[in-house]
Image (cartoon, grey):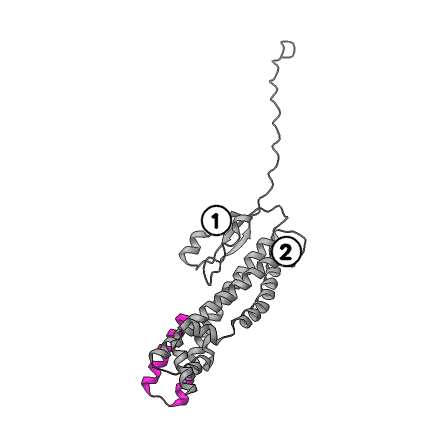
């Protein structure tokens, strides 16, 4: 009876509440920030030193400055929150699928735990569930079924991991680049895009911005490869006034 009551209580909960109750999100957030923030700062330092080298400034970029540390703290929190949000969507897909099929608490819990499905976002979890139903329809041997399922899951998770990594590396590289130019005479930066970039990025290529206006513009979208380059303007040489022309004196008759 106790088990039956627990199942009934579980099934009355909303999908969102099940997700919140099931996972220790505070621990995930704390662990995520402790990993991501140092990675941001490390990339920013390398990018900052590169920009100083391009501008021919003999100095070393100090990444432990208030602006960089504050930025890394802010965006590591935002990234963890975004990943949590997408992961929650993924779990909701699993819960929704389980409830529609009349599964019990134990069965749905196993679906969530099995192969760590919480690593996928909503769209990917839906795709994996669809693939799983297709495999079940084929009535494959259990070992082959698991092999194919694991392979598809790994592929989806790898795609998501690469997308997040590339996007966040791009973000920290570009912010570190801008930070390193603080206090220098270089006030403008220009967007540089890859030759095979998307139309949106190609339209932005070559556009110049003041440093203060440039912050937060890159990456333009997930997986964006655009980056900032410093605009180096040569100092104009002062104009030297021309000497007034002295008219030639006409020769006198005696000198002729």
Residue picked out by circle 2: 66
| Residue 133 shown in magenta | yes
Up-down: is 199 above or below 253? below
Q: Element type at marker 1?
A: loop
- Residue 53 visible to the viewer: no
Question: To which quarter of the image does residue 111 belong?
Answer: bottom left
- Residue 146 visible to the viewer: yes
Q: Is residue 255 left or right of residue 25?
A: right
Q: Position of residue 218 (x, y in %)?
A: 50, 56
Q: Position of residue 241 (x, y in %)?
A: 61, 28
Q: Residue at x 44, y 79 (%)?
A: 112
Distance between the alpha carbons at the discs numbered 1 and 2: 28 Å
Up-down: is 107 above or below 56? below
Q: Residue at x 44, y 55 (%)?
A: 201
Which numbered disc, 1 or 2, marks the residue that appears first in the sequence? 2
User: Which image quarter holds the C terminus?
Assistant: top right
Residue picked out by circle 1: 207
Q: Element type at marker 2?
A: helix
Residues in magenta? 122-147
**In the orientation shown, which residue stands out farthest toward the left?**
137
Q: Position of residue 34 (x, y in %)?
A: 59, 68
């Amino acid at each position: 009876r106790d088990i039956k009551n627990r199942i009934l209580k579980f099934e009355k909960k909303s999908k969102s509440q099940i997700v919140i109750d099931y996972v220790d999100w505070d621990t995930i957030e704390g662990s995520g920030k402790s990993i991501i923030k140092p990675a941001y700062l490390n990339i920013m330092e390398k990018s900052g030193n590169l920009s100083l080298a391009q501008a021919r400034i003999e100095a070393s970029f100090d990444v432990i400055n208030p602006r960089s540390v504050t930025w890394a703290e802010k965006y590591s929190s935002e990234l963890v929150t975004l990943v949590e949000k997408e992961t929650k969507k993924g779990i909701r897909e699993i819960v929704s699928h389980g409830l529609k099929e009349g599964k019990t608490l134990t069965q749905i819990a196993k679906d969530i735990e099995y192969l760590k499905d919480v690593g996928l976002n909503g769209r990917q979890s839906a795709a994996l569930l669809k693939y799983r139903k297709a495999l079940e329809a084929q009535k494959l041997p259990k070992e082959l079924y698991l092999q194919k399922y694991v392979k598809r899951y790994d592929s989806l998770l790898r795609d998501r991991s690469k997308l997040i990594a590339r996007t966040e590396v791009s973000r920290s590289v570009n912010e570190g680049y801008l930070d390193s130019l603080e206090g220098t005479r270089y006030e403008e930066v220009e967007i540089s895009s890859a030759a095979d970039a998307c139309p949106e990025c190609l339209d932005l290529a070559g556009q110049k911005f003041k440093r203060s206006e440039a912050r937060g513009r890159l990456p333009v979208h997930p997986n964006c490869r655009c980056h900032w380059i410093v605009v180096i303007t040569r100092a104009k040489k002062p104009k030297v006034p021309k000497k007034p022309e002295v008219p030639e004196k006409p020769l006198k008759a005696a000198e002729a």
